[in-house]
Every structure is written in C-alpha cells, then in structure tokens.
Image: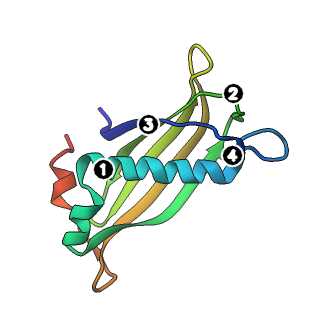
Amino acid sequence: MKDLFVTLPLKVKTYDIDFAGIVSNIVYIRWLEDLRLEILDRYFPIQEQLKRDIAPLLLSIDIRYLNALNLYSKPVGRIWLSKLEKLRFHLEAEIVDQSFEEGRVSVRARQTGVFIDLKTKRPIPFPEELKKHIS
C-alpha cells in the first residue's frame, strides 16, 4: 500500500509545448506541485494548515525524464508518501501516458520536504492530521 496515494488526470495545453513539439520540462515541475497540493486538498487542506500557522516546504526534487509527452498525450499523475522521518517526508511520483494501452511512464520523481512553523520558519514534526492516514 502506498500511503497518501493520489492520482490526478493532467492535460497537456498548447502553451505546455516547447519548440521541439514536446512538453517542456518546467511543466512537469508544475504538475508535481499540482499533485502535492492534491494530497493536501484530500488529507489536510492548506486552509487548515494556515489556521495552525504551519505549511509544507519543499527541499528537493529529483526528476527523471523517461519518455516525452506531446499535445496528444493523455498524462495521469500519481504521487504517494514513500518515507517518513522525524521531520522530513519523502514523496515519489510518476506521470504516466495513458494514450498507450499499458500506460508508459514519462517521468519519475522523488521529492523531499518538511513542514514549518510559519512564525519561526523552523521545521516541525510531520502533522498528526496527515499521520492518521498512514497505514
């Protein structure tokens, strides 16, 4: 089981395409942000975090571009919590092109982040509101 697992249909827009006719690398970064926000929307909305003066902070992204997407691709994003430490959390994500019958992974990414206290700007333990959804 993948904790905090989320899938999200994505849409390639004409402005996502670069001069070579494929999805620009920066679009994948935006989609990863959309996926992280979808986790929070489902399990611990940003509005609730802000009421507690906390917020997530991304520390790093490791992204592997495997197969290009184009305007006719049908991407679906998947993201999940892969590891939890005292302060840091690790997410894994992939974007799969569903225009292939078996699906074809276009991107794999790993992300590391923390939650911070907005007043002190210091890391805090992973919120209990999210921990309760972890098996």
Residue 72 circle label: 2
Residue denoted by label 4: 16
Residue denoted by label 3: 8
Could you tell which of marks 4 and 1 lies nearer the N-terminus? 4
Spatial CA distance of label 4 from label 2 is: 12 Å
* Labelled pair 3, 1 in contact (Cβ < 8 Å): no
Amino acid carrying mark 3 in the image:
Leu
Between 61 and 24, which is closer to the camera in this rendering?
24
**Residue lying farthest top?**
101
Amino acid carrying mark 1 in the image:
Asp
* Labelled pair 4, 3 in contact (Cβ < 8 Å): no
Residue at the location (57% across, 36% down)?
Answer: 11
Amino acid carrying mark 2 in the image:
Tyr
Residue at the location (65% across, 41% down)?
Answer: 13
* Labelled pair 3, 2 in contact (Cβ < 8 Å): no
Q: Quadrant of the N terminus?
A: top left
Spatial CA distance of label 4 from label 3 is: 17 Å
Could you tell which of marks 2 and 1 lies nearer the N-terminus? 1
Neighbour class for label 2 at 10 Å: few (<14), some, many (≥20)? few
Could you tell which of marks 4 and 3 lies nearer the N-terminus? 3
Residue 41 circle label: 1
Q: Image check: 52 left or right of 3?
A: left
Spatial CA distance of label 2 from label 1 is: 28 Å
Residue at the location (31% across, 52% down)?
Answer: 40
Could you tell which of marks 3 and 2 lies nearer the N-terminus? 3
Could you tell which of marks 3 and 1 lies nearer the N-terminus? 3
